Amino acid sequence: MGDRVYNHGFKAFQASLPPQSATGLLRCKCQESSQVSKKSAHKKETKRHRVFILGAGVSASAGIAVARDILRMSIVQLAESSDSKKADRVHKLLTYLYPGFEEELRNYPNIEDFLNLLEMAQKFNTEEFIASKVWSDERLDEVKQITIKAVTEYIWERMRDKTRQRTVDEFVRLAMKPCDTIITFNWDLIIERSLENYPKNPTFEYSYSRKRKSKAFSLLKPHGSIDWFRKSVVEKLAPKADTLHLDKKLCVFPYFSRATSPKLLDAVPIIVPPVAAKKFNFEFLKRTRRGIYRAVSDATELYVIGYSLPKEDQFARLVLRRALRYNIIKAGRGDKEPVRLTVVNPDETVGVTFSRLMPKGKPSPTFYQATLEDYLNWLEESA
């Protein structure tokens, strides 16, 4: 199946772009092309490939909790709902895996750590290893589904107030332009909504192709999305739904409305936790991972915003490490310009993490210890 281009009724892209900034993020492509000297006119034109890697820090600017807080926020919301008994099941497993956990203290663990432990508990729940008579595979899977569904409900609830999107909308408008590749590890639809507000109708593709001729954004979501479902589930619960197929088993419901499709509230969306033992049950997710490798290895400008490269997601660490290595090899052969890596994160240790991905003798990343809000303010002042 060929790659599909999705246009969710986006507004059109204006021909006028922001002026050049100190970071190079806001440079106008037409201004750059006009500065090409006659001396280099006959040389092979070097193509720019701009890639943005977005993490939980971007969604945090829109009011969605980061990994260390989102489990607490989601399960507390579940406990206060009519499904409080489901929250009790999660609490029982938390007490089993974390002896120091106390519901009254609300000392919930990082969701990535919890899902990793849950994954390991399922994987080694056999007589050969450490089988549990109390926590069967079925009970563990039930808690896993309850947790993912609770997180999904929390995200939908936080997204109801669209005014929280202003920072992300402004950043996308100022810093990004069609043909850019966006890799987001977030499950929410914050970036999709920002693209809807982008001037002049830019479409986007849920894929990356080196041969693409369109000026669409390339949007890659390796951890899935809260509006992605199994096709079989949508066909059963909402047979008349207007969906877009990602592969033979997976579809995206871009017009999903909780009001018009209430039955889908019972469906668990396809979101992939950032765990070490990652499983790929969909061909589309395999293609997405390959697309990430190719996009990062092709990048001439790589911007990492609010993403910490968590140790729990070893697969992502491997893919990005290998992609950056191949990127540098290609630059050394003269196939492309050397990559310029910019990292924005309020945690100073993240700068060290990404600097270690670069080989010795190569330029270190440009690191800004800042939130997205502060970085955006600086961009606007520099414009």
Image (cartoon, rainbow, N blue to C red):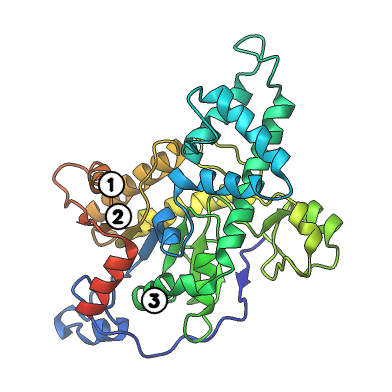
Residue 252 x %, y %: 68, 61
In the rendered image, the vertical position of residue 301 relative to residue 319, given as above or below: below
For image coordinates 47% across by 57% down, the residue present is 184
- Where is mark 2, residue-wise? 345
Mark 3, other Cα within 10 Å: few <14 / some 14–19 / many ≥20: some
Q: Cα distance, mark 2 to mark 3?
A: 18 Å
In the rendered image, the vertical position of residue 277 relative to residue 194, given as above or below: above
Q: Cα distance, mark 3 to mark 1?
A: 24 Å
To which quarter of the image does residue 17 belong? bottom left
For image coordinates 39% across by 76% down, the residue present is 170
Mark 1, other Cα within 10 Å: few <14 / some 14–19 / many ≥20: some
Closest to the observer, 327 or 88? 88
Residue 187 x %, y %: 55, 55
For image coordinates 33% across by 64% down, the residue present is 372
Of helix, strand and loop, which one carries label 3? helix
Q: Mark on residue 170? A: 3
Q: Amino acid at mark 1?
A: Val
In the rendered image, the vertical position of residue 199 relative to residue 98, given as above or below: below
Q: Which residue reaches farthest front?
A: 104
Residue 225 x %, y %: 60, 56
- Sequence-first disc among 2 and 1: 2
- Where is mark 1, residue-wise? 350
Q: Are marks 2 and 1 in contact (CB under 8 Å)?
A: yes
In the rendered image, the vertical position of residue 197 relative to residue 239, given as above or below: below
Q: Quadrant of the N terminus?
A: bottom right
Mark 2, other Cα within 10 Å: few <14 / some 14–19 / many ≥20: many
- Sequence-first disc among 3 and 1: 3
For image coordinates 65% across by 49% down, the residue present is 80
